[in-house]
Image (cartoon, coloured by chain):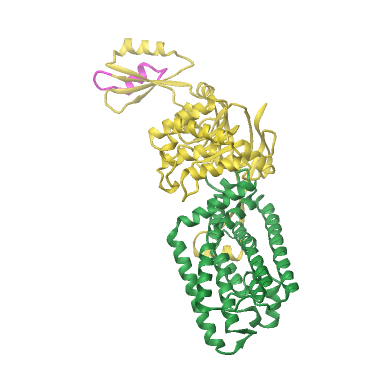
Amino acid sequence: MANLDVALATISFKRKIAYKSTWFFSVLFGEWSLLAGLAVWNHLIGDGEIGGYDWDAMKAYLIIGFLTGTLAWAGSDWEMAGRILDGMVAIDLTKPVDFQRARAAEYIGGMTASIPSAILGTAAAALLFRPAGPVSPLAAALTAFSLLFIFPLAFGISYLATLACFLTQRFLGIQWAKDSMVAFFSGMMIPVALMPVWLQGVAWALPFVHFTTTPASIYLGRVDTAGALGLIAAEAAWAVGLWVIGRLIWRRLVKKVTVHGG
Amino acid sequence: MPILEARSLTKTFRRPDKASGFKGAVKHLMQRKFKNYTAVDGIDLSIDAGESVAYVGPNGAGKSTTVKLLTGILRPSEGTVRVMGRDPHTERIANAHDIGVLFGQRTQLWWDLPVEESLKLLKHMYGVSDADYQRRIAKFDELLDLNEFMPALARTLSLGQRMRADLACALIHDPKMVYLDEPTIGLDISVKDRLRAFLRELVNDGTTLLLTSHDLADIEEVCERIVVIDKGAIAYDGSIERLKAHYITTKAVNLYLEGTADVPALAEKFPDYEWTAGEAPSEVTVTYESGRFTTAEVLGSLTAQLSPRDLSLSEPSIEDVIRRLYAGELTK
């Protein structure tokens, strides 16, 4: 079965890289977004600090945000949703594979296609802007480990969003809502530390925060080792929780699947 | 022992009950109403291993919904289905190993990758060994000229090539039970002939086949048994020969006379037959009840008394019977 997961992930990877111009533009606009963020925060912070971030720390935060954002937005939400909306899910249901596991393999395979651009962009930005380094080698290792959870978390959230298509019959609004939630509560737009305290509580209670705030907090030493391990445990718990919720919802929805036409 | 057995199979869908126009749209937004629509209505169907069954009916009769129920895609509202002893919906994965499905209007190829990539992924999915994969690909190539487009991207294939590739995808794991939902839709005559030859070969090899099609030539060339469905219920279930024998009660002779055919005078002269004017003034069609008269008797009396310039016999057509079944002119 593991072979099948790899085969599905590989197919999805190949499909992503089949469209080279899309790949090129996603890198280009990702970098552009990073540059815009750097310019805005440079103007705001100047020689001081905001929310405990000085300019060097903010550069590191934004570059980590670029890295995680490049990975998190690289999944194939529309393809997953499109198969439900146009009835291609009927074909998926005639295959001897677990629906959720197959979609996870495809989704994560598609995400891996963005790893080269994420690494390339991050390395280029690090060389150009000289951000703050990790507080310790252990923090660097734990940051890298926490970044791995972006893959199952991104899938879990996108899978639940696309399952909503069974009820809404549309995906555009759901996609906008999901993207807004991820961008806002992850801290990609504004660091969570700058939000009102009550909103910080909301952010930390949701899975989105682990896309940027968690790896950046570990990297910059805003949490100690125990805190870092706690955050990684929370990421793992969310990954498992989202998987289980997805499975429970699918079990109910598959009984109500409607595919009209030939 | 049936390989497939459906009892009182019923599928009801809920559809929005919305009036047309802006007012209807707003009203539906405020007060949502739905109507139940029964697509499949208490079908009993039993298919033995090795049978080739045509499942036909007019558009919207419930053919595709039945196939989706039998393949486990949809859950029946009422009734039961067992395929090789399993419930195809609740035991979907186990069932999927033993069935092959082709929906003519939906492709299972990965659109932006070569055909070969799709087949290799399916090989992984079904756990097909390298040797079996190579052997089956060689056979598909022999019958469907698969290698002609194996390296091509699926989105660049012609419809005929796409259908041949999809057929290979549906059969790569050598399924025991195969469902083909309109496999020849939109294809040209030569590709249709090729696919039919392939399907005959498949049936001869012992595969159980359920075929839905609007093309009755598919049915006559590939299947022995025909199930006609209309408004979600079975209108006929039996052999094609029995269908013809049971429902084709009349035969026809086309006569080409010297001069203009006087149809009322002929009808008066031969009151046991039904007379219809043909396309040309000298052409006339004589319809007679095959149970009362033999063709020899009819031809004997007509040629002796009318001395036609030429004549032709109209063979009984399955298409006519199906058309009349769809139109509700014939009953079970």
Q: Residue at x 61, y 76 (%)?
A: A133
**Residue placed farthest to the left in the image?**
B259
Residue B112 place in picture, x, y as percent: 46, 51
Residue B91 sits above or below residue B47 on the image: below
> In the rendered image of this protein, which colour is used for chain A?
green
**Residue placed farthest to the right in the image?**
A226
Residue B52 among magenta residues = no
Residue A207 visible somewhere in the drawing = no
Q: Residue at x 50, y 37 (%)?
A: B167
Residue A141 visible somewhere in the drawing = yes
Q: Is B108 displayed left or right of A202 in the figure?
A: left
Give the residues drawn in magenta, as a range: B257-273
Q: Which chain is yellow?
A: B
Residue B43 sits above or below residue B1 on the image: below
Q: Nearer the viewer, residue A13 or A76?
A: A13
Residue A86 place in picture, x, y as percent: 53, 53
Residue A179 place in picture, x, y as percent: 57, 68
Residue B156 sits above or below residue B97 on the image: below
Residue B264 among magenta residues = yes
Q: Quadrant of residue B260?
A: top left
Q: Nearer the viewer, residue B55 or B140?
A: B140
Q: Nearer the viewer, residue B109 or B218?
A: B109
